[in-house]
Image (cartoon, rainbow, N blue to C red):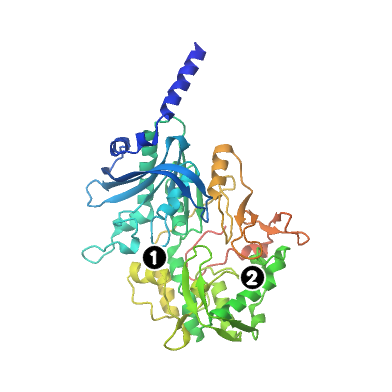
Amino acid sequence: MAARQICMTLAVAATAKAISLSDICSNSKVNGSLPSLQGIEFTGVTSINTVLNASVESGINYPGATGRDYCNVTITYHHAGKDDDINVWYYLPSPAQYKDRFLATGGGGFAINSGASLLQSGLVYDAASGCTDGGLGSFGNGLTDAPLKGNGSINYDAVYNFGYLSIHEMTVIGQGLVTNIYGTSSKLYSYYQGCSEGGRDGWSQVQRYGSQFDGASIGAPAFRQAFQQPQHNWPQIFESMNGYVPTTCERQKIVNDTIAACNELDGLSDGVVSRSDLCRLHHNASSSIGGKYSCAESSSMNPITGASGSTSPAANGTVTAGAVAVYNAIIEGPVHSHGRRIYTGYQPVADVSSNGSGTYENATGKYEAVATGIGNKWINHLLNEVSTSTLSMDGITGHFALGFSRAYRSTVIAWKRHGRIWKTLGALENVLGSVIEWVEKGIEPTTLNATFLFGDREGQTEGLCSFPSRPMWKGNDSMEPPQCVMPDDEALKTWFPKLNSIPLDVYDDA
């Protein structure tokens, strides 16, 4: 009798799995599988189509895949009693390729989603995946596209949706949808993946709704925006006050000298500075003063995204004290006019070309300190302040303080048994895969493989130590993995500078 019951159970499970992509990819099936959620009213499916034999190119945080079949569906809903429309977008893998996983994804910059570029990562991990437009009108719109209220006040519904609510709703809708549409009784494993604004999105979810996720891969979280966004204008502020704007070539000469000086602090001569903490303590950029530089005309490019930047004319000369002062200001971070530190700076060998160089003006033939980019947009749009074309210390201090007063303070402690932090500039192409193995198989990661994007070791991988441990090689041997060692107290403190410009805790460094 017991054997018969087991056979019947297996038969039921097999029947639940024996559905096809065409069975799930229809208006009626998706609409009939939407969960019932308090306060949410569905308009229903607004677009749906089947995609067969798709290939996924590897990204900076996930590997590639081929032969993927999925249902591409967009659903619209609104909040009861409110005149809003929010769109959610899902990739539902073929039942044969689905392994009871759901992946929520976040955005970047002022965007609440990364579109297909992150949705497709779910296909790599045999997971249904989702994103949201946050009610901003389309998946291509960002927070700065949200209209103000009729009286000119902030549209707080849009801010709250962007801040945390829409990704939460996209997640619970997606979890209910896949549970119903695939009809499996197995545990649904839920994950989150995002970087930059998507990293902030991720923390907003695990802080408020931690129980709805089994794991999260969160990179470069753009939180503490009251500090982080105005910080983007700090280099131009200092250049304006200092009366000197270095050329791109002069700035790069200082960075190259720093790399050469700090290269072997990790025990390996490979052109990579893994011990930026020791570099900050022991290298003095003033040693570059008087050094000669010469560069041909060039155009900048983001090594991570491949996006093109500004064009710099040919330049040659010697490094000045003014350029070193700008470099030091960038890596130390913004300070108050009385010398108190406002926020953290960059690492000593970071590529600060997007923030650290001025803008070359053809009309004057000079580099000018011009505030542009996301920090400028944040101040002008979200703080509704005067134009940041006029740069001053009092101005940036006010922007930090004003932004902080409009935020709230929250602290998260990640216990060792629950989380890991890795610090890197490179391609961590399978972090989520490591998280999935940790959650589902109990394989706890000690290092993460990162891929070198350029240089002599381009294409090679290296295991990254989990923070705060740092790598140290023996005998200058790149064939042997490094030891992960704990930095001494002085080196560790470089990661947690005291931020004392305001009489409140900016973060908890206890």
Q: Quadrant of residue 275?
A: bottom right
Residue appearing at x 41%, y 77% in the figure: 395
Amino acid found under the numbered disc labelled 1: Ser
Can you say whether 444 is above or below 228 in the image? above
The disc, 1 or 2, on the residue closer to the chain's N-terminal end is 2
At which x and y percent is residue 314? Answer: 54, 83
User: In whole angstroms, how far apart are the C-alphas of marks 1 and 2?
Assistant: 31 Å
The residue that mark 1 highlights is: 405
Residue appearing at x 54%, y 74% in the figure: 330
Residue appearing at x 60%, y 70% in the figure: 349
Dot 1: element: helix
Q: Nearer the viewer, residue 126 or 130?
A: 126
Q: Quadrant of residue 351?
A: bottom right
In the picture, the quarter occupied by the C terminus is bottom right
The residue that mark 2 highlights is: 280
Q: Nearer the viewer, residue 71 or 158?
A: 71
At which x and y percent is residue 362? Answer: 43, 85
Amino acid found under the numbered disc labelled 2: Arg
Looking at the rendered image, the disc whose residue lies closer to the viewer, 1 or 2, is: 2
Can you say whether 345 is above or below 294 in the image? above
